[in-house]
Image (cartoon, grey):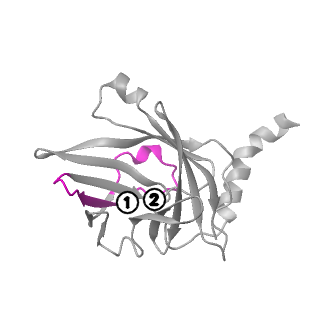
Amino acid sequence: MLRAWKPLAPAALLLVLACQPRSAEPLYTPWEEGLTLAFEDPSQPPAQRFGNRLQVRVAKSSMAPGTPPQVQLDLASVRGQRSLYLRPQDGGVTLVAESGRVLGQLLPPGFPATTTWTESGVEYHVIGRAAWSGAALLPATADPVGVWVEARLPGGGRLRTLFLPNHGEVEVQELRGTEWVTVNRLVSRGFTDFPALKRP
């Protein structure tokens, strides 16, 4: 019985995804249950880079109309595991406790039309849109154009982060002297569970 269904599985998956409603406003965070992303620091030697790999998996996603949206991300690395809870709403992304208590604002409401904001002493501003150079990792249906955001840290450091629709952060660059060096980059993308239905 299972053998008979195997050739039909990819076609059934495409049909299910194609029939689901799509939103006009993208979310700049991962939210599809089962989506699993792996990140590495390309500035490190290869062995160290792989050993310090960070895996981010969407463990739960509550996006039903009429309820506060919340996404649980499970993070795993050689240093241990932890969970983060995000609330994507009105174009922004809020970091919350499991109870829903607000802990911080990762992206402001109205993002990316909201181009400047400050959070915990860090000044952020939108640099602009750009196609991600690592877009070969993405499925053909994914939008490869994201938004670069620069952060000016209280100590004088500067970071640039590229956010892609439905993926969130895919690359982080750090200003070292006069050169922007990539210190975090999405290197793997897939599903560890069957993709859940898309949000209405």
Q: In this rendering, would 89 be left or right of 60?
A: left
Q: In this rendering, would 125 be left or right of 55?
A: left
Q: In this rendering, would 153 be left or right of 135?
A: left
Residue that protrudes farthest toward the left in the picture: 178
Q: Residues within 10 Å of mark 2 (few under 14, many from 20)?
A: some
Q: Residue at x 38, y 57 (%)?
A: 163
Q: Secondary structure at mark 1?
A: strand
Q: Residues within 10 Å of mark 1 (few under 14, many from 20)?
A: many
Q: In the rendered view, would you say 118 is above or below 192?
A: below
Write the start and end of the magenta stretch as one range: 131-157
The residue at which mark 1 appears reads as 146
Position in image of residue 51 (x %, y %): 42, 26
How many numbered marks are there? 2
- The image quadrant of residue 9 is top right
Q: In the rendered view, would you say 115 is above or below 4?
A: below
| Residue 143: numbered disc | 2
Position in image of residue 68 (x %, y %): 61, 71
Position in image of residue 66 (x %, y %): 66, 77
Is the C-beta separation of discs 1 and 2 under 8 Å?
yes
Classify the position of the N terminus by image quarter.
top right
Residue that protrudes farthest toward the right in the picture: 1
- Kind of residue indicated by mark 1: Gly
In the image, 35 versus 140, the foreground residue is: 35
- Kind of residue indicated by mark 2: Asp
In the image, 109 versus 147, the foreground residue is: 109
Residue that protrudes farthest toward the top in the picture: 47
Quick check: is 144 in the magenta stretch?
yes
Q: Residue at x 70, y 51 (%)?
A: 13
